[in-house]
Amino acid sequence: MTLLLVHLSAALFMVGVIWFVQVVHYPLLARVGTGVFAGYHAAHVRRTSMVVMLPMLVEVVASVMLVVRAGEAGPPRWMGLAGLVLLAIVWVSTFAVQVPLHDRLGRSGSARAIRALVATNWVRTTGWTARGALAVAMVDAAR
């Protein structure tokens, strides 16, 4: 049960972070002045990385462990596999779409890149939200 609760905590933490980023933080990038945008953006990337790096790693390790240890009085294997698929979607989107957009933003601060970041981030927002719901269901299934 400890593994499930660690997994649940990491998943729900990331759900909260991604919704804040999606609804508040990314849209407000458009209000940062061009003269200070590069410095602001660099600080944003550095500080956000410090906040999310550990929970993201905990989430992936716990997710893999849940699949490996499926059947040990825990949730069914399909739930763990579904969680890993959702996590893969989130991570692929992060490193194939959002990171390159952040790189572009760091160089240009373009309004177009900000709009693309907000629009494409819905993939991660939806994926992490589904993961959060699945993590809750996994705890329920293990009781």
Image (spheres, rainbow, N blue to C red):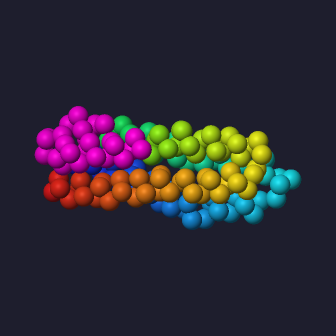
Query: What's the magenta region?
Result: 64-89
Q: Main secondary structure of the magenta part?
A: helix
Q: Residue furthest top?
A: 68
Q: Position of residue 46 (x, y in %)?
A: 65, 43
Q: Quadrant of the C terminus?
A: bottom left
Any part of residue 19 in sight? yes
Vertical comparison of 135 with 103: above or below: below
Q: Residue at x 43, y 57 (%)?
A: 126
- 88 relative to 74 in the view: left or right: right
- 33 relative to 1 in the view: left or right: right
The verdict on residue 10 being magenta is no
Q: Position of residue 13 (x, y in %)?
A: 44, 55
Vertical comparison of 125 with 3: above or below: below
Compare residues 126 and 76 and report the one nearer the observer: 126
Q: Residue at x 46, y 41 (%)?
A: 91
Q: Position of residue 87 (x, y in %)?
A: 39, 44
